[in-house]
Amino acid sequence: MDEIYNRVKPMDIEYLKKANRPEWDEFCFQSDYAWFWHTSNWIEYCVHYKPHLKTESQSFFLKRNREIIAVVPLFVENHEIENKTYKVFRMAEGPILFPALKSNISEKEREKILGYIFAIFDEIAREEDVAYSLVYLTPLIPISLRGEFPTFNILMKYGFNDCSLNTRIIDLRKNNLWNDMRKGNRWNVKKAKRELTFEVFDKDKITKEIYEKYRKLHHKAAGRITRPLVTFEMWYEWIKQGHGFLSAARRKDEYVGFGYMFYYKNACYYGSSANDPEHADVPISSLLLWETMMWLKRKGCEFFEVGLQQFGDLLYDMPSEKEKNITFFKSGFGGKVYPMFRGEKFWNREYFLRIMKSRVNEFAKRIIR
């Protein structure tokens, strides 16, 4: 840690609190290294998403002479394996976000600041007996969408092991989006249009009544309540703030499908879908995805991330058949596969051995018949 201190100019650490949320969020909006997942809204959501994890945010600013240099989303969660609980740096059981840095810093300065941040991770892990960390870089940050950063998994420079995945992003600036779709997807869209009407409920059109229809259909489609009510309330507020919207499919007078989309800067993320199982004879999802693309294009949005592309088993990621089918479905709407760089780091030998044993056993079951 002393070596890192000596390589950067003195910086102050300030933890994210309710009082400084506006300052945090304004920095995120201005930073080329930040997207909606970095904002205090998402951080608050992750704390409430899975209560059994007892998630605690330790997210912090790095400041130099009162100027924000970086914001660092950081969470401590409690994960159980083989009847033993370990502290880990994760975010709602997923990876935590790569830090968001001040725009227009040099590559040399960026490397120094990142080294400083990840040395802080090491120090906290030692002090609080944290066993593991999983970090990822979202490709929706502006500097990534411009093709300027990163060109490789930079996390490996800071002691992380590569465990990257892939995602699909559609460039809405293109003119031939219809032709880019798979033939079967085009057929499904045409079929759905004969039965369904598409609507968008953004900040100007959303009502509590419509949002409740989405929430209840979400529960019906899943067959259960998947997360706390407070998290649905947060998502409703984000629509009113302009950071989300609902895509809806209506069959006559009944809403039979919804998609929740996150919207921030010039990009959109397909967050959640819920289709009425009683109307499975109509390709609802095909209509929702295509018409959402067209609505976003008219709005001037440039990029639309539709989600993970999980093609097969990896030692650290073993998708279900349903997840692989979703990959195939989404790939039929065009776009390109982008790397989603991820890295993991272990500080606890016992945790490492238990995780690796679990992964190897499951992997062997899948690939050796």
Image (cartoon, rainbow, N blue to C red):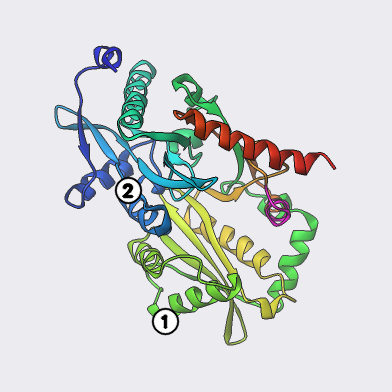
Q: Quadrant of the N terminus?
A: top left
Q: Quadrant of the C terminus?
A: top right
Give whichever of 111, 129 is nearer the camera. 129
Q: For numbered disc 2, what is the local secondary structure?
A: strand
Q: Is residue 325 above or below residue 217?
A: above
Q: Residue furthest left?
A: 65
Q: For numbered disc 1, what is the local secondary structure?
A: helix
Q: Is residue 9 above or below residue 42?
A: above
Residue under label 2: 56
Residue at screen point 46% across, 30% down = 348
Q: Identity of the amino acid at label 1?
A: Glu
The magenta span reads 319-329
Residue at screen point 43% across, 61% down = 244
Give whichever of 264, 212 is nearer the camera. 212
Taking the image as shown, residue 144 lies to the left or right of residue 43, namely right
Q: CA distance from mark 1 to mark 2?
A: 33 Å
Residue 315 lies, in percent from the top left, at 66, 36
Residue 50 lies, in percent from the top left, at 43, 58
Residue 212 lies, in percent from the top left, at 44, 78
Q: Is residue 323 magenta?
A: yes
Label annotation for residue 275 = none
Quarter holding residue 104:
top left
Residue 339 visible at all:
no
Badge 2 local density, few (<14 within 10 Å), some, or many (20+)?
some
Disc with the residue nearer the chain's start (1 vs 2) = 2
Residue 160 visible at all:
yes
Q: Identity of the amino acid at label 2?
A: Glu
Residue under label 1: 209
Quarter holding residue 256:
bottom right
Q: Main secondary structure of the magenta part?
A: helix
